[in-house]
Image (tube, helix red, strand yellow):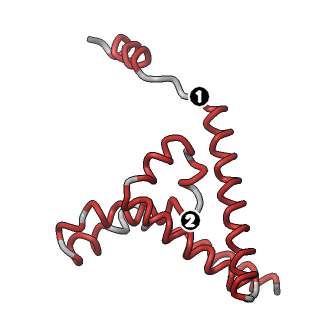
Amino acid sequence: MDKKTYADLVNKICPKEKICINALVSFLFGGLMGLLGEFIIELYQMLFDIPFKEASTYMIITLIFFGCLFTCFGWFDKVIEFAKCGLIIPITGFAHAMQSAALEYRREGFVTGIGANMFKLTGSVITFGIVSAYFFGLIRLILGG
């Protein structure tokens, strides 16, 4: 079988992506995540009488906790099938990536399993975040902000 015939066969079998619908669903779920985050911040400010900055930190911790918890129960993957990037892009997706890697390698032990493999997916995100923070901090220092 030549390459063109094979490519035609693959194109015939592969499902077509609905890019506009996927983008709209991702946008809506991302917006709902933002709305949920703001609701949690307002709730923490009202219940605990704390400033916005502290409530924001607690909101992030809450979303990370529930992202990890839903990953442990196997619910997160099912929701992502529908919500697409609306849940993968925020901090919940980062928590899911770390938690799922930790769950996958937990039988190999804490150091060689969880410790060595938990950052396989998220290491690049952490590295990019650190490098970006350094450069933007340097730019802010130079501009005198």
Q: Residue at x 68, y 78 (%)?
A: 56
Q: Secondary structure at mark 2?
A: helix
Residue holding disc 1: 18
Quarter of the image for residue 39 reads: bottom right
Q: Is residue 89 left or right of residue 145?
A: left
Give the secondary structure at mark 1: loop
Which quadrant: the N terminus?
Answer: top left
The amino acid marked with disc number 2 is Ile
Within 10 angstroms of label 2, few (less than 14), some, or many (20 or more) residues?
Answer: some
Depicted 88 relative to depicted 127: above or below: above
Identity, as a three-letter code, of the amino acid under mark 1: Lys
Image quarter where the C terminus lies is bottom right
| Label disc, if present, on residue 91 of the rendered structure | 2
The x and y percentages for residue 45 are 74, 82
Left or right placement of residue 54 versus residue 91 in this view: right
- Image quarter of residue 141: bottom right
Marks 2 and 1, Cα distance to the nearest angstrom? 25 Å
The x, y position of residue 81, in whole percent, is 48, 42
Contact (CB < 8 A) between labels 2 and 1? no
Which of the pair 50/94 is nearer the observer?
50
Q: Position of residue 90 (x, y in %)?
A: 59, 60
In the displayed structure, would residue 48 be above or below residue 28? below
Q: Estimate the x, y position of residue 63 in percent, counting from the top left.
A: 56, 68
| Image position of 33 with respect to 49: above or below | above
As drawn, is 120 to the left or to the right of 31? left
